Amino acid sequence: MKTIARIHTDFPTKFGIPRQSGIIPSLQGRIVFEPEYRIPEAVRGLEDFSHIWLLWEFSEAVRDSWSPTVRPPRLGGNVRKGVFATRSPFRPNPIGLSSVRLEKIDIDPNLGPVLYVSGADLMDGTPIYDIKPYIAYTDSHPEAVSGFASTPAEFLLEVEFPEEWLKKVPESQRESLIAVLAHDPRPQYQDDPKRVYGMEFAGLDVKFKVDKMLLTVVEVL
């Protein structure tokens, strides 16, 4: 398996990354090919598709051993399910799959074709193994049954973002950051109203507390 590209996003660490692709459409990403694959002909025709599949590596979850069962955060971290019945990053092969919107393709004089995408759920620098077009008539199954993940898990939080901290966030990043916070970036089994959480986003360190359904930003560095 060869890394063909890497994606650049506003998430330098895993904390805060949306739990599935497409949940926060305003999140932007940029896919830059490795030197060997910076060939414009390799993406010829891709501009005709609105969405693409990304096959990538859970680069922060690589390990020598694996477990046949995992504890999905969706179920509070207390129930074990078979690893192949989940999207856990801790798998025999650390391969991720995401569907993202392809916004545009630019041909950079130094980097070759650069793909701009939205709705990505990947950490900055994540290695990408392959890119494939999303084909609606085969890839979309509205009648599909989704087991324990059949309904959206996220209940949007109310975000209280004091102006003194909000003004430290570039205007172009505010919508995405507030959306990430509203989707509750905490592990789903943590619920301590006094705990201060820290999340890195777009070069900022955002600190916040959550009390029931209210998330309050307490500092932005």
Image: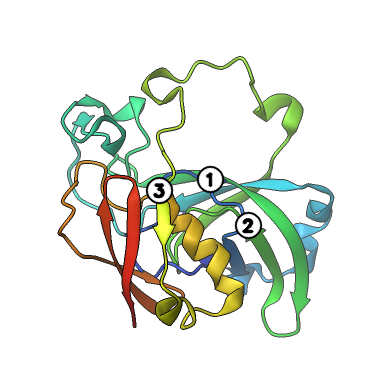
Asked if disc 2 and disc 1 are in contact, CB closer than 8 Å, the reply is no
Quarter holding the C terminus is: bottom left
Q: Residues within 10 Å of mark 3 (few under 14, many from 20)?
A: many
Between marks 2 and 1, how big is the CA–CA gap?
10 Å
Q: Element at badge 1? A: loop
Q: Tell whether 129 sits left or right of 45.
A: left
Give the number of callouts.
3
| Amino acid, disc 2 | Ser
Q: Residue at x 57, y 46 (%)?
A: 22
Q: Is residue 93 toward the left or the right of residue 196 in the image? A: right
User: Which mark is drawn over residue 23?
Assistant: 1
| Callout in the foreground (2, 1) | 1
Q: Compared to 95, does 177 lie above or below? A: below
Where 6 sits versus 102, above or below? below
Q: Amino acid at mark 3?
A: Leu
Which residue carries the number 3 mark? 157
Secondary-structure class at tag 3? loop
Quarter residue 39 falls in: bottom right
- Position in image of residue 115 (x %, y %): 68, 64
Depth check, mark 3 against mark 2: the one in front is 3
Which residue does the image show at 19% across and 49% down from the upper left?
64
Q: Amino acid at mark 1?
A: Ile
Q: Is residue 216 left or right of residue 175?
A: left
Task: Decide which of tag 2 and tag 1 comes sooner along the chain.
Answer: 1
Residue 219, percent from left and from top: 31, 76
CA gap, disc 3 to disc 1? 14 Å
Please give the residue where the numbered disc 2 appears in the rendered image. 118
Q: Earlier in the sequence, mark 3 or mark 2?
A: 2
Residue 93's label in the rendered image is none
